[in-house]
Amino acid sequence: MPHWVPSSWRDFPAQQQPVYADGTHLSHVLEQIRQSPPLISVAAIEALRIALAEVADGRRFLLQGGDCAERFQDCSAAKIENKLEILSQLSDVLADITQKPILTIGRIAGQYAKPRSLDIEGREGDFALPSFRGDNVNQRKPSWKARQADPRRLWIGHQCAALTLQHLRSLCQGPFYTSHEGLLLAYEEAVTYEVPAYKRHYNLGAHFLWIGDRTRQLTGAHVEFFRGIANPIGVKLGPHISPGELVRLVERLNPQREVGRVTLITRLGHANVASLLPSLIHAVQDADHPVLWVCDPMHGNGFLAETGHKTREFTSICAELHNTAAVHHHCGSRLGGLHIELTGEAVTECLGGPQELGLSDLSTNYQTYCDPRLNGVQSLALVEQLVGHIHR
Ligand code: PEP
Ligand code: CO
């Protein structure tokens, strides 16, 4: 493999990157971030990799969850405590069901950037309206000015992540592991350092980072960046991944076949699992790659409701989880964890569940900045679906 430095990705095509009007301003902010104290320690990242290897071996079960898009305004003690509370409730229920210790990773303290299907979202008078790309990039307010990418938001996001981490640490006995989609490569480069003691580069902005389904191109900048960081990493797999492409991807990301290094997070859509997942599993088995398989039952099941809200049906989410667990069992593989978008707050963003939320309920408390999350009641009902599914 060719030599790697944190900026190597710049020679590859990068999807989903904001365009900043003032490049000098951006460079200043990135330098300020690079000079600021790192958020995460190498020791904690290494500890997570060992814990993930235990998940891959069936000795633990993984719960990864949090908001689709964190908001700067939610960097508050109450919101962080609320998130921790629902994750710990879910982890208790999962421990009961799986009879395994639960490893929890939050989608938290840095999940501020979003990939979008469209660059342009509509019009404001004569102007095309750029899409909202998360609080790290621009404002959600639908005006041309508010939607311009602003480098100062990267610095604010970095500080919100630091404050969130500090509060999580004060509330937890052991380490609390954090994760986000490693989307904005200029930012991720700025928080990546060579650690001489390990002779490797670490991204010290989060314990775990994942590559989104929209940016996992083999020859793209994200895969190039991720192959060089020593953190445990995830890859989201949507219905367009082919078995051959998947094998090349894990080969590129984990040539040494380290256990705990790569987590494959499938989000195929509930109706596609039975037809697509077996050949993905078999391809990885045949290539003898040690991966951890996790189910994201959320992202393959979204749709736009007639009310104009982005939503998901609780029954489809459950169906994806059931089908995924069944296919792993059938293929002699192991489902090692669950990746979900949730909040402990009583939001009405997903349809159905124990509260039988209907279309007319969506507007009652629809808060998300991006994808619809399960509320506390729905999340607890979802993890209950794993009863009888975790065999070994
Ligand atoms: C997400 O996790 O919010 C996301 C955008 O996922 P995916 O890359 O799987 O679409
Ligand atoms: Co999402």
Image (cartoon, rainbow, N blue to C red):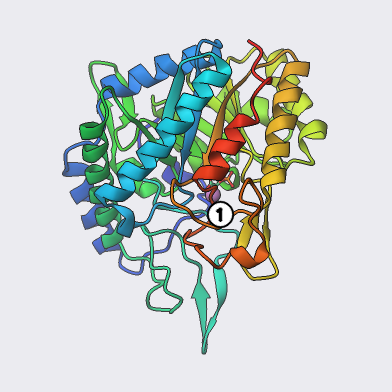
Question: The disc labelled 1 sits on which kind of residue?
Answer: Pro
Residue 311 in which image quadrant: bottom right
User: Is 48 or 298 nearer to us in this picture?
Assistant: 298
The residue wearing badge 1 is 372
In the displayed structure, 347 sits above or below 90; it is: below
For the point 32% across and 65% down, the residue is 150
Mark 1 CB within 8 Å of ligand 2: no
Residue 277 in which image quadrant: top right
Residue 254 appears in view? no
Please state if 66 lies on the left or on the right of 278 as rendered.
Answer: left
Please state if 219 lies on the left or on the right of 5 as rendered.
Answer: right
In the displayed structure, 57 sits above or below 189; it is: above
In the displayed structure, 358 sits above or below 166; it is: below
Q: Residues within 10 Å of mark 1 (few under 14, many from 20)?
A: many
Percent coordinates x, y for residue 242 in the rendering: 74, 34
For the point 21% across and 38% down, the residue is 166
Please state if 248 lies on the left or on the right of 286 as rendered.
Answer: left
Task: Tell me the SS state at disc 1.
Answer: loop
Percent coordinates x, y for residue 306 in the rendering: 70, 69
Most extreme residue toward the right is: 275
For the point 48% across and 33% down, the residue is 64
Residue 45 appears in view? yes
Q: Quadrant of the C terminus?
A: top right
Percent coordinates x, y for residue 58 in the rendering: 56, 12
Percent coordinates x, y for residue 34 in the rendering: 22, 43
